[in-house]
Image (cartoon, helix red, strand yellow):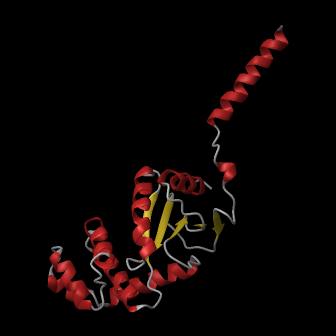
């Protein structure tokens, strides 16, 4: 009788533990869902970095999924972005656009608008004056923009973006890098599935 009671207690504990266990963890495989890269240093805490370009159609179409994923992981994982230039004039101009938006703390205000400008209005940034005109319309002082768009500071920032892209082993965009070393190979279109994978890697 005592043995039977102990058996029931142990069985109940096993069932309870199995309910609490992260069932998805065993399904994630290096080489299939992610790969470990030399990577880049990140500040402490869980962080996922999106390598993207406003000129990339895949980035444009995937942006809504990434935004929803970021909402699901709010207060758990910090989201950062690195714009990729790959030496293309229009892509480099978009790197500058992101830097300017970040500099004036208006990324949230202009992010979707830049994507729409390029992919719906077919008006990519091609010269510095395009940036000045766009951001002036967003309320940024024209004289500040004129000083900034071709400054040494912006050139240094672009060099840093390019270095991050190279060190992270980025071969295409959009790409997601977790904690500076886990490069996602599986970009699910399901925000919750993507959030689960990111959270799993963030805890490694």
Numbered disc total: 0
Vertical placement of 110 versus 190: above or below? below
Vertical placement of 194 versus 94: above or below? above
User: Residue 27: where, in percent of width, then height?
Assistant: 68, 52
Q: Residue at x 59, y 63 (%)?
A: 186
User: Residue 189: where, in percent of width, then height?
Assistant: 50, 59
User: Residue 183: where, in percent of width, then height?
Assistant: 59, 68
The quadrant of the image that shows the N terminus is top right
**Among the 4 quarters of the image, the one containing residue 59:** bottom left
Q: Residue at the far top: name it.
A: 1
Q: Residue at x 27, y 87 (%)?
A: 149
Q: Is 161 left, or right, of 90 in this rendering?
A: right
**Among the 4 quarters of the image, the one containing residue 100:** bottom left
Vertical placement of 45 versus 168: above or below? above
Which residue occupies the foreground of this view, 128 or 78? 128
Q: Is 15 left, or right, of 62 in this rendering?
A: right
Q: Residue at x 47, y 51 (%)?
A: 76
User: Residue 140: where, in percent of width, then height?
Assistant: 17, 76
Q: Residue at x 39, y 59 (%)?
A: 67
The quadrant of the image that shows the C terminus is bottom right
| Residue 26 visible somewhere in the drawing | yes
**Among the 4 quarters of the image, the one containing residue 58:** bottom left
| Residue 75 visible somewhere in the drawing | no
Q: Is 114 left, or right, of 38 in this rendering?
A: left
Which residue occupies the foreground of this view, 136 or 105? 136
């Amino acid at each position: 009788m005592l043995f039977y009671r102990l058996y029931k207690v142990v069985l109940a504990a096993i069932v309870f533990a199995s309910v609490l266990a992260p069932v998805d963890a065993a399904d994630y495989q290096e080489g299939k869902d992610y790969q470990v890269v030399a990577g880049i240093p990140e500040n402490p805490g869980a962080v996922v970095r999106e390598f993207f370009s406003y000129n990339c159609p895949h980035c444009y179409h995937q942006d809504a999924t990434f935004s929803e994923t970021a909402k699901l992981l709010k207060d758990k994982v910090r989201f950062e972005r690195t714009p990729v230039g790959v030496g293309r004039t229009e892509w480099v101009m978009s790197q500058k656009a992101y830097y300017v938006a970040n500099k004036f703390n208006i990324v949230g205000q202009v992010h979707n608008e830049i994507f729409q400008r390029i992919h719906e209005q077919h008006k990519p940034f091609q010269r510095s004056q395009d940036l000045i005109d766009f951001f002036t319309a967003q309320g940024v002082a024209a004289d500040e923009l004129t000083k900034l768009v071709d400054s040494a500071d912006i050139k240094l920032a672009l060099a840093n973006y390019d270095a991050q892209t190279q060190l992270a082993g980025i071969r295409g965009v959009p790409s997601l890098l977790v904690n500076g070393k886990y490069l996602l190979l599986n970009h699910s279109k399901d925000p919750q599935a993507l959030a689960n994978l990111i959270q799993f890697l963030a805890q490694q």
